[in-house]
Image (spheres, rainbow, N blue to C red):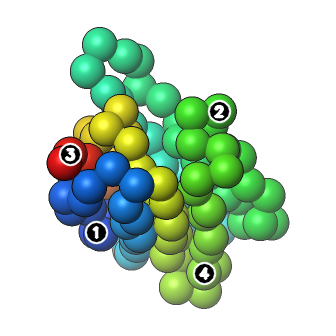
Amino acid sequence: QVQVVESGGGSVQPGGSLRLSCTASGTTKNVYAMGWFRQRPGNQRELVASINNGGTTYYGDSVKGRVTISRDNIKNTMMMQMNDLKPEDATVYYCKVVTPTGDWWGRGTPVTVSS
């Protein structure tokens, strides 16, 4: 079993920044990859950013240039720095952890962007 906990969400004004964190605990040996997903109203769930155990990163087109993802493989923690937030970034962000025993999801952390 793997437990996934997200934190760092909150409310900011347009142009603001947030730093989201995701920590995996339990049977976390050989975590392959970690990623952030979101599902905005009227849209399918989308991969925002991900990082594998080799440090290779992926960024969705909607966040490129505004988001930086990093990972601590020893602590099984992933961080995502989000800058220049826009109203369309507002939704719940979910962390997914990929391991040899399966994929594990957190309960999400909400992001609100409004003036």
- In the image, residue 112 sits, relative to residue 75, either above or below, namely above
Task: Tell which circle, 3 or 2, labels the residue nearer the N-terminal end.
Answer: 2
Mark 2 — residue? 61
Kindly report the distance in space between the C-alpha atoms of the residues bearing marks 2 and 4: 24 Å
SS type, badge 3: loop
Looking at numbered disc 2 in the image, what kind of residue is underneath it? Asp
Looking at numbered disc 3 in the image, what kind of residue is underneath it? Ser
Image quarter (top left, top right, bottom left or bottom right) of the N terminus: bottom left
Q: Residue furthest top?
A: 42
Mark 4 — residue? 72
Mark 1 — residue? 7
Looking at numbered disc 1 in the image, what kind of residue is underneath it? Ser
Task: Tell which circle, 4 or 1, labels the residue nearer the N-terminal end.
Answer: 1
Q: Nearer the viewer, mark 3 or mark 2?
A: 3
Q: Position of residue 99 (x, y in %)?
A: 57, 56
Badges 3 and 1: C-beta atoms under 8 Å apart? no
